Amino acid sequence: MTENPFAGYDVIVVLGPTACGKTNFACQLAARYNGEIISADSRQMYRHLTIGTGKDLSAYQVNGQAIPYHLIDIADPDTPFYLHQFQAALFEAIHIIRQKGKLPIVCGGTGLYLSALYTSYELTAVPENEELRHKLRPLDKNELIRQLNTFPEQWTKHVDRQSAKRLIRGIEVATYLQENHLQPTIWPSYTVKYLGLSVSKETRIERISKRLKDRINEGLIAEGEHLLEMGITHDRLQFLGLEYKHVSHYLLGQCDKETFIKNLETAIIQYAKRQMTWFRKMEKEVAIEWIDPLTSPYLL
């Protein structure tokens, strides 16, 4: 291994499914190779979402060295932070870190946010149309798909047709584009090294189970209660990710605590599987080097 295996790369990406140790690994890389972390987690940018999102801020200390981080705690949880906003913030953070002569290390498991490095997301800037949404919400998925298919394919090919919410947003965007033009943004081009952390399915499930128990003991439910006391609605809480969705169900009395824990654990395991499916599709666009975080030569 050369002294700096990342020479020639502008940006490093550390990705992988939930509970595979991304934050710790990325911070170790940052300590060794003079880097700073950029979070590519779709929820860690929200303030007050700490336990449920696994911010693990203690990991940003390596052998007494503070590891600088970006895009964590930059938005209020009651206000949506859209993908195009993240993309702009991502490239700004990369620029700032590189101006310091340091190595940007993007760390996260949200595939859509990771793809912001090589895909443009101007369409997320389309404003919400509550009147149209009100008309579309009662429709079943087949009718939503039929309506979506009446628009040009270049406006709709990216839409997830398994989700009624995504179908409604797709129709909303396509309706907007009928009368408006979005000017594409030209983002800088960087040489990126993608590192995927690989752990066995059994290890991942064990870690998910242990981590969930730890988070409940650390006050996950109380964190959900605090968010509600701040004025966050249950609808918004459920939109802020699996942990908060299931906490909301529990606090609404829709299940007992044992069922809450069991359902949430199952949902997280299923989410990790979906993440791996996304990364396999992502490999059609970029090369990912899969490594074992415990034996990685980059930290030997």
Image: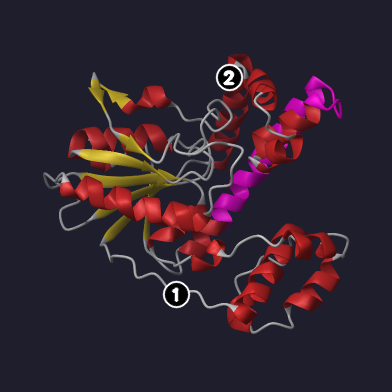
User: Viewed as shown, does residue 208 lie left or right of 132?
Assistant: left
Q: Position of residue 292 (x, y in %)?
A: 38, 42
Q: Of tags 1 and 2, which is closer to the observer?
A: 1
Q: Secondary structure at mark 1?
A: loop
Q: Amino acid at mark 2?
A: Asp
Compare marks 1 and 2 and give the one earlier in the sequence: 1
Main secondary structure along the magenta-highlighted residues = helix
Q: Alpha-carbon neighbours of circle 1 within 10 Å: few (<14), some, or many (≥20)?
A: few
Q: Is residue 213 above or below residue 170?
A: above
Task: Indicate whether 189 appears above or below 36.
Answer: below
| In this rendering, position of residue 240 left or right of residue 20 | right
Which numbered disc covers residue 214?
Answer: 2
Left or right of 72? Residue 153 is right
User: Can you tell which mark lies on residue 229?
Assistant: none
Q: Which residue is mark 1?
A: 183
Q: CA distance from mark 1 to mark 2?
A: 46 Å
Residue occupying the point 59% across, 24% down: 210
Disc 2, SS:
helix
